[in-house]
Amino acid sequence: MQLTLDVDSEVPIYQQIRDQIVMAIATGALPAETPLPSTRQLGADLAINFHTVNKAYDLLRREGFIRVNRKSGAVVRRDPTTGPPDTGVAEAWEERLRILLAEAVAHGLDAEEVLARTARVLDSFTTDATERKTP
């Protein structure tokens, strides 16, 4: 797993880690049951405090992307191509989407541009995941 951090970003490092892991799950780079590095190992690899990695992993766990076990460590919980999400995921996602769409409207993006950009991004996940599963 390759993570790139921008220490000058306004986005906190734990959030950058969380976002990149979610992207890797969405594209198929991290399929279900893939073990993640320990918090200490990833912290050392990224030259950051392991508590920062722990915060990212805890957020991912609470959101249902990974499970954490004392013996096996952090493991990707599910593959996005295996079926519908758990109950409530779509509703929670829609609430976050509402904020993103409000930001787009407030910045003056019209509906056609928002839809075109959304389709392009969504297609990139579908294409990436398909390419990874095709031998």
Image: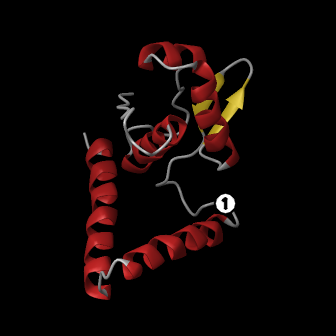
The structure residue drawn at horizontal position 35% and vertical position 31%, both measured from the top left corner, is: 4
**In the rendered image, which quarter is residue 93 located in?**
bottom right
Mark 1: few/some/many CA within 10 Å (<14, 14-19, 20+):
few
The structure residue drawn at horizontal position 25% and vertical position 77%, both measured from the top left corner, is: 116
The image shows residue 71, relative to residue 91, as above or below, that is above
Q: Residue 129: x percent and y percent?
A: 34, 50
Which is nearer the eye, 5 or 27?
5
In the current view of this chain or complex, which residue is farthest to the right?
A: 70
The image shows residue 109, relative to residue 80, as above or below, that is below
Quadrant position of the N terminus in the picture: top left
Q: Residue 125: x percent and y percent?
A: 33, 56
The amino acid type, in three-letter code, at marker 1 is: Asp
**In the rendered image, which quarter is residue 25 located in?**
top left
Side of 74 relative to 81 (left or right): right
Which is nearer the eye, 132 or 103?
103
The structure residue drawn at horizontal position 33% and vertical position 44%, both measured from the top left corner, is: 133
Give the secondary structure at mark 1.
loop
Quadrant position of the C terminus in the picture: top left
Which is nearer the eye, 64 or 111?
111
Task: Determine which residue is flagged by label 1.
Answer: 86
